Image (spheres, grey):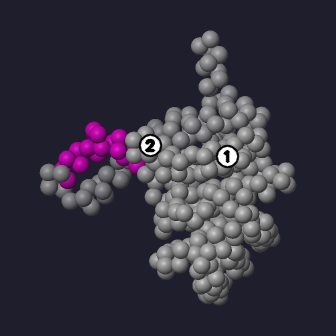
Amino acid sequence: MAEATSRRTDPAVLVERMLQGDRLALARLITHVENRTAAVPQIMKAVHGRGGASYVVGVTGPPGAGKSTVVDRLTAHLRAEGATVGIVAVDPSSPFTGGAVLGDRIRMQAHALDAGVFIRSMATRGSLGGLARATGEVIKLLLAFGHDWVLVETVGVGQTELDIMKLADTTVVTLVPESGDAIQTMKAGLMEAADVFVVNKADRAGAPALMAELKFTAHLHYASATSAKDIDWEIPVLSVQAQGDVGVRELLTEVRRHRATLERAGALQARRRARLRGELETLLLEALRERVARGLTGGALRAKLDEVVAGDLDPYSAVEAMLPMISLDRA
């Protein structure tokens, strides 16, 4: 019995089962990633390079903009076409458990029992970028599973949600008429993050004014940044009423148009290569930080630390002396 249980939970076996279409194995692998277990490197090595034909769409914006409804309706349209969809919904963390405060089944009940849709809620766990630390790895698992599309909904914390542009192929920024004032403080960052703007709940007062402002700002951004862009793309501004499924098909059309533009220019692969480089740099810095932290608990690094704390050595001189002591190889 113990041997059978061990095999069911063995990461290598879970990866094998997940690649064969086992949803429970996928869920357990995501739990490994979220909990940062020792098996994470092994898991990510096993799924590296899989799912290259899939596409990742990020949906971000301020709280209350209707991001969950937009994702829900996009999923319905994709499923009507026969496409499979993986959804990552990044929720606020519970201050008591660290888990997601909201929940996948609560907001997207229509798809909860659909075998062609896999939904996972994740807690931010203190991440300030609108995304959980492990979101990128969860996306890779969903891609390796074979989902045609992966939709990532961020937590909705405003200006700090720009991490999504590091993970998504296309980023949809969702706003509501009430966001007009917030745009003044957020639009610089939003213009860099957005590939498509959506004004949701467009039947409300103030929607035409917000759309006009967004279109004007998007055009100015396009005119001033064309030479620096990797594709010729002016951010479209769409009017949507996601609750009534109005304008969602047009949104999907614009996402596909953006994808085609990226592919035509060779920018999609270039962006994904840049993403891999960024991931490597992040992992390398994390490994180095952990190695330094261990080194400061004893030995030569700790001796230099003690000298700084005692006031016998300045921090800059200490760093110069400590760097040659830090070995980058495991030996």
> In this view of the protein, which residue sits in the foreground, 252 or 330?
252
Q: Secondary structure at mark 2?
A: loop
Q: Residue furthest right?
A: 81
Which residue is rendered at x = 62% and y = 18% of the image? 5
Amino acid carrying mark 2 in the image: Gly
Q: Percent from the top left, x then y, of residue 107? A: 62, 50
Crowd around label 1: few <14 · some 14–19 · many ≥20 (10 Å): few
Vertical position of residue 84 compared to residue 231: above or below: above
With 83 as the anchor, is 283 left or right in this view? Answer: left
**Looking at the picture, how far across and down is residue 132, in whole percent?**
52, 51
With 318 as the anchor, is 311 left or right in this view?
A: left
Mark nearest the camera among 2 and 1 is: 1
Is 165 placed left or right of 257 in the picture?
Answer: left
Asked which secondary structure carries label 1, the reply is helix
Could you tell me residue 118's position as x and y percent?
70, 44
Q: CA distance from mark 2 to mark 1?
A: 23 Å
- Queried whether the magenta region covers residue 82, the answer comes back as no
User: Is 295 inside the magenta-drawn segment?
Assistant: yes
Residue 115 quadrant: top right
Which of the 4 image quarters holds residue 221? bottom right
Q: Main secondary structure of the magenta part?
A: helix
Q: Which residue is mark 2?
A: 98
Q: Quadrant of the N terminus?
A: top right
> Mark 1 highlights which residue?
109
Which residue is at a point 64% across and 70% down the rendered structure image?
Answer: 201
Position of residue 222 measured from the top left corner of the image (x, y, whole percent)? 65, 84
Q: Residue at x 48, y 62 (%)?
A: 157
Looking at the image, which is closer to me, 171 or 281?
171
Residue at 73% of width from left, 40% of height from top?
Answer: 113
User: What residue range appears in magenta?
Assistant: 289-308
Question: Closer to the camera, 106 or 83?
Answer: 106
Specify which label sits upstream in the sequence, 2 or 1: 2
